[in-house]
Amino acid sequence: MKEVIKIGMADLKASVSPNVLTTLGLGSCLGIILYDPVKKVGGMAHIMLPDINSVRVRRNKAKFANSAIKEMIAKMRKLGARKSNLEGKIVGGAHMFTGVKISNPSAFNVGERNILNARQALTDEKIKVVSEDVGGDYGRSIEFDLETGKVKIRTIAWGIKEI
Amino acid sequence: MADGRKLTQIHLDALKELGNIGAGNAATALSQIVEQTVDISVPEVSIIPLQQIPEVVGPERYVFIVYSGVLGDISGTMLFLITEESASELISVLNRESNQEMDLSSDVARSALTEVGNILCGSYLNALTQMLGILLVPSVPDLANDMAGAILDFILIEIGEVADDVVFIKTELSVAGTKLDGHMFFLPNPGALDTILKSMGLLA
């Protein structure tokens, strides 16, 4: 039986084929997707911030790009994935409010920082980013099919696409 | 709570009462503009993990959100969120004397929605200022429309750097007897809540 597993904000999960991992309404947040196409084991994280080392409150590892990737790899290994098989995809990292960059410099480009840090953290783990759909000024929902490895992206303004 | 302290029911009741007074002020201000009865109530005050906020309306729901930072003696964020259908209704109430259709994506409609959000947030903060004797000023508002989760995450990211939980003061809105699916949220930054409770005499 195919099960659809929901990942909330600042949350991460791993599972196996034929299940589907999904997360809704990514704005500046980033969806990080890892997949072992041989073992058909996948993981998805909905991260909010680029770097766990730059904040005080560190309880939730799923909140940050670098710590979420490490955590996800560990979970996927327990399900039988091999690290050397892993491929990465990233989705999201938009810039939602145009005016906020003036009044609120700390939120400036957090989407972009999430993208850059996730790419770097994946490179550090020697995981190749095989495709991505990032940036822009619109929200995205994603559905990751662990049987095929395909990621379906839904938006209000631009419809559906697959990576 | 963010500062490691647990809030009691008394604290939550006090925050709800503050919310009611703020909402009453906001309702009066808005009813003067639309020349219709406006009711705003506060059905709920709670402390929730910040990742649950998008679930309040559904993360994929198409919404309009007016965002305003709160500056002054405390800092935080105020939001006015309204679903697409209710935003259309609100615009048609505002536009009823004109015989031209107003499209939600037009600059005029967007500016009107922003102004409504600004009035609601501003009068809410005014009430808090008067009640608590602390200065609260809204920053220039901004409007975004997209999936609720996508807009909210941008706002919550900033809070996420310092906290895992937020105080969520939910408000409900009706104009001329029609219930609109619109809500106001006041999200005080960590530490701001202590200042509020202290000025109400509920914290030593």
Image (cartoon, helix red, strand yellow):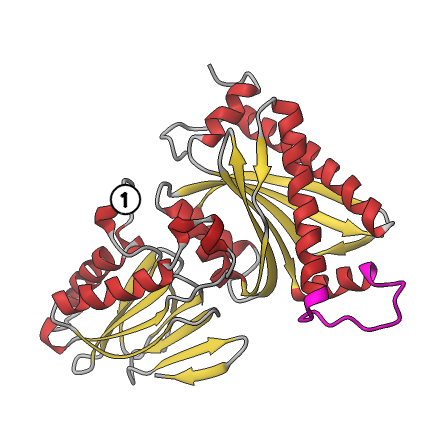
**Is B169 positioned to the left or the right of B48 in the image?**
right
In percent of the image, x 36 and y 41: which residue is there? B162
User: What is the magenta range?
Assistant: B93-108
Give B44 or B114, whichever is nearer the viewer: B114
B98 part of magenta stretch: yes
| Residue A158 x/y as whole percent | 51, 80
Name the chain letter of the residue that bears numbered label 1: A
Image coordinates of residue B48 in percent, x first then y, are 47, 43
| Residue B7 visible (yes or no) | yes
Q: Is residue A151 magenta?
A: no
The residue lying at 69 percent from left, 53 percent from top is B115
Residue B99 shown left or right of residue A80 in the figure: right
- How busy is the neighbourhood of tag 1: few (under 14 within 10 Å), some, or many (20 plus)? some
Can residue B85 be seen at all in this image of the molecule? no
Where's the N terminus of chain A, which quadrant?
bottom left
Task: Point out the image quarter for the C terminus of chain A.
Answer: bottom left
Quarter of the rendering containing residue A92: bottom left
In the image, residue A132 sits, relative to residue B63, either above or below, namely below
Secondary structure that dominates the magenta span: loop
Q: Going 9% across and 75% down the picture, which residue do you hit? A: A84
Farthest residue, direction front? A102
Judged from the image, the secondary structure of the residue bearing numbered disc 1 is: loop
What amino acid type is highlighted by mark number 1? Answer: Val
Mark 1 highlights which residue? A55
Q: Is residue A52 above or below residue B18?
A: below
**Which residue is at the front of the view, A30 or A60?**
A30
> Total marks drawn?
1
